[in-house]
Image (tube, rainbow, N blue to C red):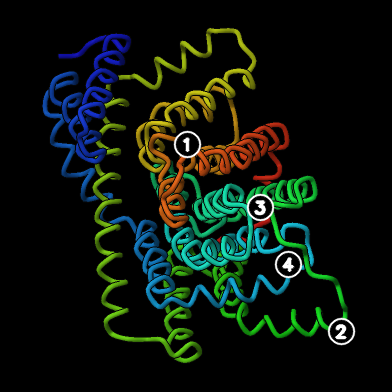
Amino acid sequence: MELSPQISTVIILVVLFGLLAGGTWISITLAATGLFGLIFMCAGGMQKMMSEIMFNNMTSYTLMAVPLFVFMGYLIVKSEISDHLYEGVSKWLGIVPGGLLHSNILSCAIFAACSGSSTATEIAIGTGAVPQLLKRGYERKITLGSIAAGSTLGILIPPSVTMIVFGVYTGVSVGKLFIGGVIPGIILAGMFMVYIGVSVVRRPQWAPKREKFVAKVYFPQVLKSFKEIWPYMLIIIFIMGSIYGGLATPTEAAGLACMITLLEIVLYYRKFSFQMFKDAAMETVALTGFYMLEIVGARTLAMALSMMGVPTYLCAVIGGLHMSRILIWFCVVLIYTLLGCLMDGLDLMLVTTPIFFPLVVHTLGFDPVWFGVTLTVILEMSLLTPPVGLNMYIVHAIGGGKRLQDTIKGIIPFFVCMVLCVILLTFIPSLCTWLPSLMAHR
């Protein structure tokens, strides 16, 4: 039976959040809610669309980039070569107030530009860095906060699995999303580092005394550190250069990056083993399967919402409120922030995009690339907020699992930096759209 959009919206939301509250897997929740809407609330035969939805998603060329980038990240993690990156970066920043705390942010930013995964970034950098910093006398709260916040850059600085899924889901160019995330990623990393520097200057007891700058010692040390860093920089150059120059699609760049990473592990680091390769492949298959189930479920729900006219109805309601689009946008941000306390970032994006993308892009008139990049920053925030903040719990475990309050207190200032970044991107949208506008197309 067909119902009015108002009643359909209420029923769908009740079913959706009822299943989520009952602890149902997010992929099953999305698919079940979508099927419920298609079968019982739309014209007959709508459930037949399910096979088309599954086939179209499973055969998406762009989505092939997801397992490739995930595999690249797991190759780096399983081969344990990320310690070299941290050691190299730490030689650059010993003279800066905060010392190795800045190394956490910069190492996470560089690793994120290779792996595209916040979890992989946090595990790879955090497991080696946190024990070292605590042993050297760095304050626990800011140490854990810097790792947790730095690792969130994994879904903003390209390549980003979240951006790939968003692009496929909405039809926005994944290449433009990748390039659009570069400047915001640098700005956010800079905000984190400024906060660390100011905090350590105000509270010198939070970090050991910084190294003295001696040119004849520092510069040779920096030059020597490039042998630890150049393999990562090569991967970044190939990924970003090929996409920005129009030489490769994100999927082709992902395949190239996997090949380069594997060659570096075999020929440069000499840490290749078939067990390592197998472990990376198995982890990739498991995580990719998880992603694909969620995407199929989200597509089913999006189809149901579209057939019932829910997005059109909500856009009409919001459009009739006679509020400025900036005020409406900040209401959307507040909703995302609150929901981020209850849902993981990717899950939150899949659940809400069918509703908010038409509203933000078509009704309010915001640029779709800007929305994708800014939404990614907002989703980063959900990785840090209790009770579901995954990065918060991972870094808490890495830090010894003592007082969760200390971890939360360490994360709060970095969360504020993210909020300020969202405000900055809102009022200066060209930070997201300028580089994509200069891209060569392929």
Q: Earlier in the sequence, mark 3 or mark 1?
A: 3
Q: Of the residues shown, which amino acid type is indicated by label 2? A: Lys
Q: Is residue 417 above or below residue 237?
A: above
The residue wearing badge 1 is: 385
Q: Of the residues shown, which amino acid type is indicated by label 3? A: Ala
Marks 2/1 in contact by CB < 8 Å: the verdict is no
Q: Earlier in the sequence, mark 4 or mark 3?
A: 4
Which of labels 4 and 3 is toward the front?
4
Q: Earlier in the sequence, mark 2 or mark 1?
A: 2
Q: Earlier in the sequence, mark 2 or mark 4?
A: 4
Few, some or many residues within 10 Å of mark 1 (<14, 14–19, 20+): many
Marks 2/4 in contact by CB < 8 Å: the verdict is no
Few, some or many residues within 10 Å of mark 3 (<14, 14–19, 20+): many
Q: Which mark is residue 189?
A: 3
Which of labels 3 and 2 is toward the front?
2
Marks 3/1 in contact by CB < 8 Å: the verdict is no
Label 3 – label 1 distance at C-alpha: 19 Å
Q: Of the residues shown, which amino acid type is indicated by label 4? A: Leu
At a point 73% along the width and 67% down the height, the residue shown is 93
Q: Of the residues shown, which amino acid type is indicated by label 1? A: Thr
Which is nearer the eye, 441 or 279?
279
Label 2 – label 4 distance at C-alpha: 16 Å
Q: Which mark is residue 93?
A: 4
The residue wearing badge 2 is: 216
